[in-house]
Image (tube, grey):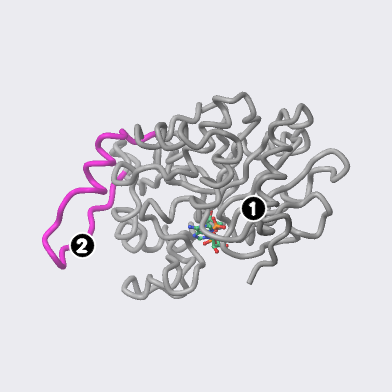
């Protein structure tokens, strides 16, 4: 039973305190760090949650180990498991969550300095967050190219191939390079294990040091170098807030840390209420 302090639970106190900081003139630049937990309520499984996470549901793909589906060496050898999974993850079938809309509200209230996301689902863009405020650290499904000659592959053709219905049991179609002399495998511009990270991410990592507040939402912070950004801000001039089902990394270690455990959409709704953005959040989210 949460002890009631001045009629408020600890959680309510933490949320009010965070909202008051966000409304103060000490908080001008908010940097977000997002992970797959932000998109689970949109119907996209995360990777590591027990039972529901992607990595515990790939048995049907006969992989040597779950992450192989996103390993470049395995993909070169056998692209079928990835393209089987791609049909289930491909953008266009999913709607942004209230948490994605919260990112857009931060921008509309001139607080969003940058949104670093590990997600490949492009839901931040779909929620209306401007492209120049999004850094997709692990790439995205938005574009694709040949892994041999790097020639871009047409978006509409890719969608048609990935989402084409096929009779039960028939193998997935694999997009191949349009250049006849090449014929290499085509892969979406998502970063596979064994590939280098987008230059746009590496180049912009120092932005995390410009934040007055870093809000980390829906990530286990297990994949480097993304996870290390959480420890970069100088604790004398930047606060951190975790919105997640579970404690991760070193969040909670610093005196200024806010650790808000639970379902991100519910916590975001409480935070928006405390910010006076409750109505706006529902209206903007309903319009996505
Ligand atoms: N609300 C709050 N937290 C949630 C929710 C939710 N609705 N759903 C899941 N979570 C939490 C989980 O408890 C977990 O801590 O989100 C986190 C998701 O962690 P992962 O599944 O590891 O996803 P992520 O951290 O984004 O993975 C990082 O791993 O495989 C690579 O490249 C892939 O970008 C991915 C990277």
Which SS does the magenta portion mostly show? loop
Q: Position of residue 201 (x, y in %)?
A: 62, 38
Q: Position of residue 248 (x, y in %)?
A: 67, 62
Q: Check the image and name the residue furthest to the front.
A: 7
Query: Pointers 2 and 1 in contact (CB under 8 A)?
Result: no
Q: Earlier in the sequence, mark 2 or mark 1?
A: 1
Q: Which residues are magenta?
A: 152-176
Picture quarter containing residue 21? top right
Q: Position of residue 228 (x, y in %)?
A: 72, 52
Kindly identify which residue carries mark 2.
Answer: 171
Q: Badge 1: few (under 14), some or many (20 or more) residues near its Cα, within 10 Å? A: some
Position above or below: 87 against 96: below
Q: Secondary structure at mark 2?
A: loop
Picture quarter containing residue 117? top right
Within the magenta stretch, is there residue 157? yes
- Residue drawn at x 67%, y 35% is 30
Within the magenta stretch, is there residue 179? no
């Amino acid at each position: 039973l949460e002890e009631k302090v001045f009629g408020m639970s600890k959680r309510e106190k933490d949320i009010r305190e965070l909202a008051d900081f966000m409304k103060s003139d000490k908080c001008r630049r908010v940097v977000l760090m997002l992970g797959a937990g932000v998109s689970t309520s949109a119907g996209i499984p995360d990777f590591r949650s027990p039972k529901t996470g992607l990595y515990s549901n790939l048995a049907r793909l006969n992989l040597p180990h779950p992450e192989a589906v996103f390993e470049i060496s395995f993909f070169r050898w056998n692209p079928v498991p990835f393209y089987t999974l791609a049909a289930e993850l491909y953008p266009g079938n999913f709607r942004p969550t209230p948490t994605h809309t919260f990112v857009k509200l931060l921008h509309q209230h001139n607080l969003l300095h940058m949104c670093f996301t590990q997600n490949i689902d492009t839901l931040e863009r779909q929620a209306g967050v401007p492209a120049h405020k999004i850094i997709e650290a692990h790439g995205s499904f938005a574009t694709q190219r040949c892994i041999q000659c790097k020639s871009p592959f047409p978006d509409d053709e890719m969608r048609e191939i990935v989402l084409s219905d096929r009779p039960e049991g028939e193998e997935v179609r694999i997009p191949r390079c349009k250049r006849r002399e090449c014929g290499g495998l085509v892969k979406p511009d998502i970063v596979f294990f064994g590939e280098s990270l987008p230059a746009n991410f590496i180049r912009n990592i120092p932005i995390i040091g410009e934040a007055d507040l870093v809000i980390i939402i829906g990530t286990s912070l297990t994949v480097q170098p993304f996870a290390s950004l959480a420890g970069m801000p100088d604790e004398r001039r930047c606060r951190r807030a975790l919105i997640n089902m579970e404690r991760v990394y070193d969040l909670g270690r610093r005196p200024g840390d806010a650790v808000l455990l639970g379902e991100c959409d519910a916590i975001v709704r409480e935070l928006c209420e405390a910010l006076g953005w409750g109505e706006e959040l529902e209206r903007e989210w309903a319009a996505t």
